Amino acid sequence: QFYEEKKEYAFHLWRRAKKKVSGWFLTRVIGAIFVGAASFIILAILNVKYGLLLAILVGVLDFMPVVGPIIGGAVLAIVVFLNSPLQALFVVFAYTIVQQLENHLIIPILFRKLMGISPVLVLVALAIGGRLWGVAGAILAIPLAAVLYEVLKDYLQKIKKEKEKDLI
């Protein structure tokens, strides 16, 4: 019975952690789609050649935290600059606004709704993961932090219940 109890507890914790990781992945996908779609609209308004292809590239690169948007913005700026330097200036300005909207509005809301974790935890995890393991760390830091958050939350709830039993 002890083994069955621990096994059920482990599976319950695994399902919750899996839900957090799935939420992170969905958040990244929605953010990338937003950036790609917004970039396409901007490029279409400015009548940029190969706008759809550039928007898809920027959206795909946006999936990679931290460096993806920088690489995407640089590619976007260079390609548009080859056609028109003035147009490139407008594209870079608009792309910066899109990135700010994604990073400061859309992603924090999605993290809170889909993952149930604080945006502060997300920023701390990104900083630590990126510092320790570079790009791979930045990509894996948030799901890892979410899993650790679930384990720690569960552990603290267990301690709290045990203390309440001792008081009674």
Image: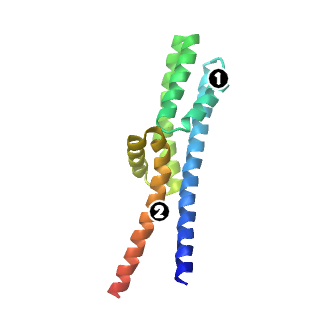
Q: Is residue 152 above or below residue 24?
A: below
Residue at image point 50% right, 44% down:
107
Q: Is residue 39 above or below residue 111?
A: above
Instruction: Confirm whether residue 91 shows in the render.
Output: no
- Which mark is in front, 1 or 2? 2
The image shows a total of numbered marks equal to 2
Q: Secondary structure at mark 1?
A: helix
User: Which amino acid does the dot numbered 2 rest on?
Assistant: Glu
Residue at the front extreme of this rendering: 3
Which numbered tag is attached to residue 150? 2
The image position of residue 134, as x and y in percent, is: 43, 39
Residue at the bottom extreme of this rendering: 168
Which numbered tag is attached to residue 51? 1
The image position of residue 122, as x and y in percent, is: 43, 49
Q: Secondary structure at mark 2?
A: helix
The image position of residue 28, as x and y in percent, is: 56, 44
Count neighbours of disc 1 (C-alpha within 10 A) and say few if under 14, some if 14 to 19, many if 20 or more: many
User: Which amino acid does the dot numbered 1 rest on?
Assistant: Gly
Q: CA distance from mark 1 to mark 2?
A: 42 Å
Residue at image point 56% right, 39% down:
63
Residue at image point 56% right, 41% down:
31
The image position of residue 18, as x and y in percent, is: 57, 59
